[in-house]
Image (tube, grey):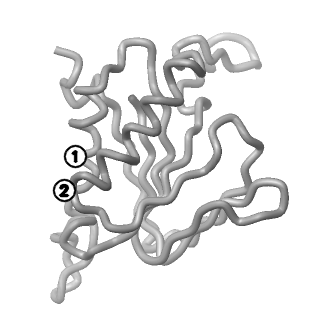
Amino acid sequence: MRVLLQRVSESSVTVDGSIVGKTGPGLVILACAGHNDTPFIIQQMAKKIAELRIFRDADDKMNLSLLDTQGQALVISQFTLYADARKGRRPSFTDAARPDLAKPLVDLLAQCLRDLGVKHVDTGIFGADMKVAIHNDGPVTIWLDSVDLGLHG
């Protein structure tokens, strides 16, 4: 799984003119499942996200996690995180999981965050044309890849 985390003061996702998810302070989590991702990998990725210390403490240091700050999360499926643009001018997305595998894994990521104690987790609509409003705080943007984190054994 690949995720792009953006620390936000607020965010929302709109589909067909209607807001389907929104948050206050917390994270926007753009997520893409790969072919070899498993529920175990997703659970470990959720734990990493929830506990990653990227929020400011009283001394203005990044020492607090999403759980510490009682932050909110907006999980958005984004298959383009697996774009391979090494050849030609059109990216390939063949490393992204097929929708029948990807949707349940992205849904599982959101559920795992809830299970870990993130009290407010909203999502977009898988496969929809989404308009995402991100009020980046910092800005702080973090890239996580389950392969780089050693989650694939």
Mark 2 element type: helix
Q: Give the image location of residue 50, x and y in percent.
A: 25, 55
User: For mark 2, does the 10 Å Cα neighbourhood hold few (<14), some (14 to 19), or many (20 or more) residues?
Assistant: some
| Figure quadrant of residue 146 | top left
Give the quadrant of residue 44: top left
Residue 4 placement (x, y as % from top left): 45, 46
Residue plotted at (60% across, 21% down)? 99
- Left or right relative to 116: residue 125: right
Distance from disc 2 to disc 1, alpha carbons, whole Å, reads 5 Å
In percent of width and height, residue 33 lies at: 46, 26
Residue type at tag 2: Glu
Picture quadrant where residue 65 is located = bottom left
Q: Give the amino acid at mark 1.
A: Lys
Residue at the spot 51% in from the left edge and 25% down from the top edge = 102
Identify which residue is drawn at 22% across, 46% down: 48
Quarter occupied by the N terminus: top left
Q: Which residue is mark 1?
A: 48
Q: Are marks 2 and 1 in contact (CB under 8 Å)?
A: yes
Report the side of 51 relative to 45 (left or right).
left
Residue at x 68%, y 20% (from the top left corner): 91
Horizontal side of 122 relative to 125 (left or right) equals left
| Quarter the C terminus occupies | top left
- The residue wearing badge 2 is 51
